[in-house]
Amino acid sequence: MDTGEFKKYIKGDRIIWAVLVALTCVSLLIVYSSTGALAYRQADGNTTHYILRQLLFQGAGYGGIILMLNYFPVKFYNQIANGAFIVAILAVLAGLAFGRGGEATGRTLQFAFISFQPAEIAKVALILWVARLLANSQKDARLLRIAFVKIIMGVGLICLLISMANFSSAVLLFSTAVIMMFVGRIPAKYLAFVMLAGVGFVMLIYFAAPLLPKEGKFGRIQTIRGRIDRHLHAEQASAKGLTQDDFAKIAIHMGGITGVGAGKSKISNFMPAAYNDFIYSIIIEEYGLIGGLAVPLLYLIFLTRGGIIIRRCTRTFPTFLATGAVTIIILQAVINMAVSAGAIPVTGQPLPWVSWGGTSQLFTALTFGLLLSVSSEIDENAQKEVENNFNPDGVLPDEDIELAKN
């Protein structure tokens, strides 16, 4: 396959493709560096094991995006939205019942040699489902109110289930749904009530934690309160030993302006999640303030291009689909970087397309693919409009063009 033929399959916004490739380069560099200690603990010292695994999954992600762009029209995602949401709920329930996790929280489902987090399925499914409901409810205010009730019930259910295993993912999904509803013209007073209810739910968990057992099904609530307390009272927590967020701050301090150099991170050897939840701090340690600004800049470019795509949409479902895809990527990136900088309590959100991961990379690729699919459809519709409006009578004959040139 020559280059020209291959380019036919690379559709959608070219700048978003460039951002995706740039994030891939960042990912491979920093994953190779930050998994050195892990390789000696779990891969018999094979330092290329994890970067090859990352490359494999990201390559599969690129393949998935190309398939989406060439074989699945945007309307297909509208058609499968309800089914995808049901599958997501069943997967989350299965994760709680049969999954495994570091604290027996049921975060991960295992199928043969493949494991995945049900919350990753929910991220994609929720975007499709909320986009479909909003798209079908734009004709009048009554339909919007009905859609609002359905979304709150559905999102509330799945976020409640996910919060039992992964509270930060529940918050991410809830926030994404609220932003999508805002773009979907749900009245602001309804959204204000929802946000207040969400804040109230978090406060309820925090203040109810001491009254609940510390083991069993309530253990996750204790974890949530503990992370908030460690964030608010960092000095007391550090007195018992350095925590991961302490190491993250040390890494950022050591990075300075120019960093310690590629592959020369020392702090990653002491952080269990250096290649995942705290990967942004390792980027700053190795590449300094320059690297620390370059990565957010890539996500800012992605946000800007996503906004342009949303404004170019002429139909409701693609508009809300693109909104959801952009929102969840940006919110997740902001959460990860804010955790590394110590601005918010520790969560379990990876840096999209950069942190080391397996199937989470594939679901992130699906999200990028949704946005690129919308962009590709817009470009194709614009091309068709130009062709349909083309008037050959208004064009000079070839010989007249040649005379004009002379």
Image (cartoon, rainbow, N blue to C red):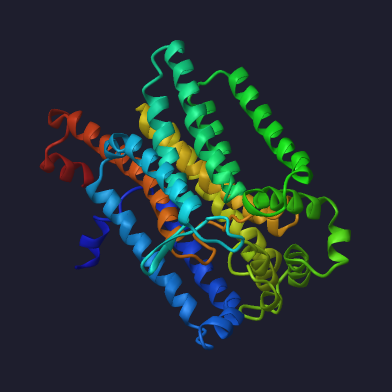
Please name the residue shown 55% across and 61% down the image. 101
Q: Quadrant of residue 2?
A: bottom left
Whether residue 263 is visible here, answered yes or no, is yes
Please name the residue shown 75% across and 69% down the image. 247
Q: Is residue 310 left or right of residue 303?
A: left
Q: How many marks?
A: 0
Q: Is residue 147 above or below residue 287?
A: above
Q: Nearer the viewer, residue 351 or 220?
A: 220
Q: Nearer the viewer, residue 293 or 68?
A: 68
Question: Which quarter of the rendering shows the N terminus?
Answer: bottom left
Residue 337 position, x and y percent, is 65, 56
Q: Is residue 204 left or right of residue 330?
A: right
Q: Is residue 84 left or right of residue 285?
A: left
Residue 218 position, x and y percent, is 66, 48
Q: Is residue 55 left or right of residue 225?
A: left
Please name the residue shown 37% across and 60% down the image. 61
Q: Is residue 194 above or below residue 264?
A: above
Q: Nearer the viewer, residue 86 or 54?
A: 86
Whether residue 308 is visible here, answered yes or no, is no
Residue 19 position, x and y percent, is 47, 56
Q: Residue furthest bottom?
A: 45
Q: Nearer the viewer, residue 244 or 337?
A: 244
Q: Quadrant of residue 200?
A: top right
